[in-house]
Image: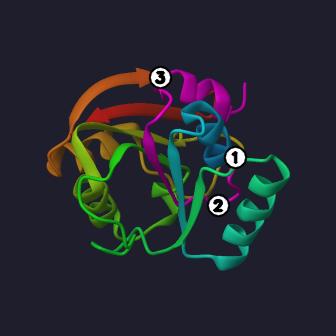
Amino acid sequence: MFSDPQKNLQQFTLTPGMKVADFGAGSGFYTLEAAKMVGSSGHVYAIDVQKELLDRIKSNALSAKLSNIEIVWGDIEKIGGTKMREFLCDRIIISNVLFQTEKKSDICLEAKRILKPGGKVLVIDWSTGAPIGPASFVSKENALSLFERAGFKFEAEINAGDHHYGLILKK
């Protein structure tokens, strides 16, 4: 099984009314699924540095009649780079991002900054040695260590597919 945003988010327990940030939203698959799950009373922030990807997410959200998505042109690798206020979000999604970033510690700190006390982060990334994955990886153990150093506590591991790992961490 390849990584399925809907199945992964069901294991993350998103509920109506939640505020969710999708760090490095990319294609928007997680953004759109999260927006459906939190409903019209919730809000999803799609954050990315690539404007053309954000434009595509905005277009797909309009086509899907999802009005609870806010597009944020921001830098998740910089503390304050999301332009969001502290303690805003209930949940943060960080999917297929760590393997391609340089400032991994700052991503953790930015997540901590905007997450409410008791809020949770879902980290999904390529498993080490996945035959179809990227050339460089961030192992599950290294990802866990990064977030624990930033003050997060491990809560659970999810089944994120054959080529990915999934971690839920609590602030």
Camera-side residue of 135 and 114: 114
Q: Which residues are magenta?
A: 1-28
Q: Identify the image quadrant of residue 139.
A: top left
Q: Nearer the viewer, residue 148 or 38?
A: 38
Quadrant containing the C terminus in the rendered view: top left
The disc at residue 80 is: none
- The crowd level at tag 3 (other Cα within 10 Å; few <14, some 14-19, many 20+) is some
Instruction: Look at mark 3 in the image and give the residue it sits on.
Output: 158
Q: Residues within 10 Å of mark 2 (few under 14, many from 20)?
A: many
Residue 12 forms part of the magenta stretch: yes
Q: Quadrant of the N terminus?
A: top right
What residue did someone put label 1 on? 29
Q: Residue furthest right?
A: 63
Name the residue tied to disc 2: 26
In magenta segment, residue 121: no
Query: Element type at marker 1?
Result: helix
Measure how far apart labels 2 and 1 are at the Cα level. 8 Å
Query: What residue do we see at 61% from left, 42% from top?
Result: 35
Q: Residue 161: where, in percent of width, then height?
A: 63, 27
